[in-house]
């Protein structure tokens, strides 16, 4: 299910619940005096809202930083493989074709096999490591035939090591960023914050209902942002693997 559809459904449900509870409460307590609200109650509502806003802001900042770090890791992995591809120009055509085919196989496997496993928080398997080791073996067992190949030999191995390090970081970064206790606090805090709307004795006038639904939609939007960014490589699709996709797209 697309993320925008998930947000739309959740937002509509929460706003409908807020309106329904407000209308039902007004019908049950039609004679309630709502002309005055204790000052201490307004102060408590304000403090709870401020604290929850700070917690939400910290959560969004944390998952956003993790998302950026994951994107940088994928970029480093793809850049290292691209550098290997480019530095092979000093080798014979047959060897270049062989190594580039192995790079193509590795990139395809990472996108089509490892990405779905990362999204499902499963083990990626050993096939990716084997394909990368094959690239390392191709280069390490190729004796330089001239000065140019000798100069390119060690940098090629360094780029393989950089790709291997980035791959391990990518796999370690898969899965959710926030622990379950933080999610419990965010959801419970959102429920408490929305519930405090009723302590202010709001009525079902169009203006008050509009404010209540707008505030509810804002809380849902912020929670949705945290949920969306909580998966560094996304909840669905392979958009975050674009740098690796470009490797085998360009060679096809």
Image (cartoon, rainbow, N blue to C red):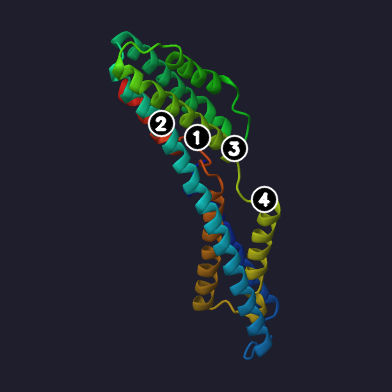
Residue drawn 53% across and 28% down? 114
Q: Nearer the viewer, mark 3 or mark 4?
A: 3
Residue drawn 44% across and 14% down? 138
**Circle 1 — which element?**
helix
Quarter of the rendering containing residue 20: bottom right
Q: Quadrant of the C terminus?
A: top left
Q: Nearer the viewer, mark 3 or mark 1?
A: 1
Q: Which residue is mark 1?
A: 166
Q: Are marks 3 and 4 in contact (CB under 8 Å)?
A: no
Task: Pick whichever of labels 3 and 1 is earlier in the sequence.
Answer: 1
Q: Nearer the viewer, mark 3 or mark 2?
A: 2
Q: Which residue is mark 2?
A: 80
Q: Are marks 2 and 1 in contact (CB under 8 Å)?
A: yes
Q: Are marks 3 and 1 in contact (CB under 8 Å)?
A: no
- Per the model, the C-alpha gap separating discs 3 and 1 is 10 Å
Q: Which residue is mark 4?
A: 179
Residue drawn 60% across and 24% down? 125
In terms of depth relative to the viewer, which is nearer, 30 or 181? 181
Q: Are marks 3 and 2 in contact (CB under 8 Å)?
A: no
- Per the model, the C-alpha gap separating discs 1 and 4 is 24 Å
Q: Position of residue 71 (x, y in %)?
A: 45, 42
In terms of depth relative to the viewer, which is nearer, 106 or 235? 106
In terms of depth relative to the viewer, which is nearer, 168 or 232? 168
Compared to 52, does 201 lie above or below?
below
Residue drawn 67% across and 50% down? 179
Task: Pick whichever of labels 4 and 2 is earlier in the sequence.
Answer: 2
Q: Tag on residue 112?
A: none
Task: Pick whichever of labels 3 and 4 is earlier in the sequence.
Answer: 3
For label 3, count other residues whose C-alpha is less than 10 Å away and answer few (under 14), some (14-19) or many (20+): few
Q: Are marks 1 and 4 in contact (CB under 8 Å)?
A: no
- Per the model, the C-alpha gap separating discs 2 and 1 is 9 Å
Task: Pick whichever of labels 2 and 1 is earlier in the sequence.
Answer: 2
């Amino acid at each position: 299910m697309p993320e925008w559809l998930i947000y739309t459904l959740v937002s509509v449900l929460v706003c409908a619940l807020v309106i329904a509870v407000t209308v039902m409460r007004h019908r049950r307590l039609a004679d309630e005096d709502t002309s005055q609200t204790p000052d201490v109650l307004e102060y408590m509502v304000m403090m709870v809202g401020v604290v929850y806003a700070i917690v939400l802001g910290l959560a969004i900042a944390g998952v956003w930083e993790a998302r950026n770090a994951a994107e940088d890791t994928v970029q480093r992995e793809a850049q290292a493989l691209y550098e290997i591809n480019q530095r092979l120009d000093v080798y014979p055509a047959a060897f270049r074709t062989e190594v580039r085919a192995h790079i193509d196989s590795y990139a395809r496997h990472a996108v089509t096999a490892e990405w779905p496993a990362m999204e499902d928080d499963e083990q990626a398997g050993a096939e990716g490591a084997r394909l990368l080791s094959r690239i390392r073996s191709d280069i390490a067992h190729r004796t330089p035939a001239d000065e140019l190949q000798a100069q390119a030999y060690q940098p090629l191995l360094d780029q393989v090591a950089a790709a291997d390090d980035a791959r391990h970081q990518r796999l370690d970064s898969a899965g959710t960023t926030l622990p379950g206790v933080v999610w419990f606090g965010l959801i419970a805090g959102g429920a408490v914050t929305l519930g405090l709307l009723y302590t202010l004795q709001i009525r079902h006038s169009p203006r008050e209902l509009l404010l209540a639904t707008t505030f509810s939609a804002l809380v849902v939007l912020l929670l949705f942002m945290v949920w969306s960014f909580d998966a560094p490589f996304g909840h669905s699709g392979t958009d975050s693997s674009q740098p690796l996709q470009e490797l085998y797209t360009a060679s096809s």
